[in-house]
Image: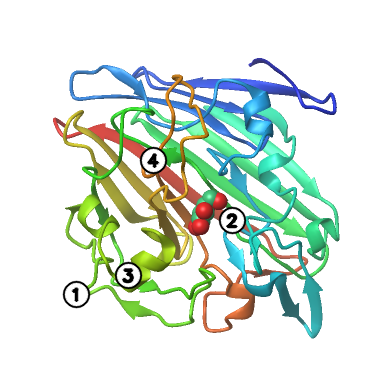
């Protein structure tokens, strides 16, 4: 643990470094629970930072697209910035046109979390007061980051509330398996374990349809390079300026709480592989469509469109308004638990 400076309003922020026997190194800060660096080996054992991010707290405090952050209370969009729970309508901050995005104006990504060391990692905790960003109930959240010797970066989320509420927690890391700042992710080869996805309207809100991926650019059941689909003239792709969709993970044979393989990314030049395992029902595959040249990353290079990809394990966007989606409601006396593992290896393994 070391000091990482102070927020604009003077609160100290710490940085933690996790290491393992295989030489991997992960850095995170207590501001936003942001994973700032993830150093993973290539097929020759050379480490590179595969996570997009910055080199200072000031840059994380300025506007940026949620690099590495814990997003909540509700990751992704809620239509119209409103929902009804037990007959009461709640109204949220709308910062993305007509929708609420990633928890509101000051979401979990901009909070300073309390940290304590645990076996193999760090536990971050944050108590979100009732009414914060318009959400009901006080939500006590903990997020545990740990790094195992199998190069597995594990994230365990837990939450409890004192009044009925909704939540959707994820981590918003952007990956480039060549190393951050090394170019686009077009040649990354992706597998998504999903027979269906949730198409969106022009606001990027799910239409409610659970559509088969078969015969569309959304079919990643067999590994394929991202580039062709990302640049295709498919209507869904054009509307979102690329991949920015929730995939419905295949979980046949798995019980609630079981980890299932959600995604596998392979980068041919470096040989790096990243698998994503999760207990969540969905994953948002976002191909960095809105990255632009105004952000300078940790290595001093500009981030351009598609220089990183996010694989955000989650419940489906807008679930509070879509009763046929898996429920995101949490009630007093219940405990929300969720786990995601990013596991790094190489094609030589
Ligand atoms: C959303 C994108 C958004 C990005 C950064 C993703 O989770 O799906 O639409 O641009 O986060 O905010």
Left or right, residue 241 beside residue 223: right
Q: Position of residue 89 (x, y in %)?
A: 80, 79
Confirm if mark 1 falls within 8 A of ligand 1: no
User: Can residue 248 be seen by looking at this rendering?
Assistant: no
Answer with mark 3 or mark 2, whichever residue precedes in sequence. 3
Answer with mark 4 or mark 2, whichever residue precedes in sequence. 4
Answer with mark 4 or mark 1, whichever residue precedes in sequence. 1
Answer with mark 4 or mark 3, whichever residue precedes in sequence. 3
Q: Residue at x 43, y 82 (%)?
A: 209
Q: CA distance from mark 4 to mark 2?
A: 28 Å
Q: CA distance from mark 4 to mark 3?
A: 32 Å
Q: What kind of element bears circle 2?
A: strand
- What residue sits right under mark 1 in the picture? 215
- Please determine whether, in this image, residue 45 is positioned above or below residue 114: above
- What residue sits right under mark 4 in the picture? 308
Are the residues tagged 1 and 2 within 8 Å (C-beta)? no
- What residue sits right under mark 3 in the picture? 253
Q: Nearer the viewer, mark 3 or mark 1?
A: 1
Q: CA distance from mark 3 to mark 1?
A: 25 Å
């Amino acid at each position: 643990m070391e000091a990482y400076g102070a927020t604009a309003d003077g609160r100290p922020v710490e940085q933690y470094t996790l290491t393992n026997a295989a030489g991997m190194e992960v850095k995170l800060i207590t501001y936003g629970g942001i994973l700032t660096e993830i150093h993973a080996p290539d097929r020759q054992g050379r480490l590179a930072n595969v996570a997009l991010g910055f080199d200072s707290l000031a840059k994380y405090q300025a506007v940026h697209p949620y690099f590495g952050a814990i997003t909540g209370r509700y990751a992704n969009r809620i239509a119209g910035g409103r929902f009804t729970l037990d007959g009461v309508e709640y109204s949220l901050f709308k910062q993305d046109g007509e929708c609420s995005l990633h928890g509101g104006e000051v979401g979990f990504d901009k909070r300073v979390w309390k940290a304590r060391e645990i076996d193999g990692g760090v536990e971050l905790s944050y108590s979100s007061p009732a009414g914060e960003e318009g959400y009901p109930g006080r939500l006590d959240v903990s997020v545990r980051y740990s790094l195992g010797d199998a190069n597995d970066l594990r994230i365990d989320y837990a939450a409890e509330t004192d009044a009925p509420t909704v939540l959707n927690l994820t981590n918003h890391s952007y990956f480039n398996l060549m190393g951050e700042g090394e170019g686009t992710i077009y040649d990354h080869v992706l597998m998504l374990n999903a027979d269906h996805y949730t198409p969106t309207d022009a606001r990027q809100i799910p239409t409610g349809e659970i559509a088969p991926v078969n015969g569309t650019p959304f079919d990643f059941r067999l590994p394929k390079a991202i580039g062709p689909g990302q640049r295709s003239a498919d209507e869904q792709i054009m509307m979102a300026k690329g991949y920015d969709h929730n995939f419905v993970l295949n979980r046949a044979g798995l019980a609630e709480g079981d980890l299932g393989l959600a995604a596998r990314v392979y980068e041919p030049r470096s040989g790096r592989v990243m698998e994503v395992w999760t207990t969540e029902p969905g994953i948002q595959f976002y191909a960095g469509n809105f990255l632009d040249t105004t952000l300078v990353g940790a290595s001093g290079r500009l981030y351009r469109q598609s220089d990183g990809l996010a694989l955000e394990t989650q419940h489906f966007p807008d679930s509070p308004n879509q009763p046929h989606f898996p429920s995101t409601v949490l009630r007093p006396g219940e405990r929300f638990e969720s786990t995601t593992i990013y596991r790094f290896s190489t094609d030589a393994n």
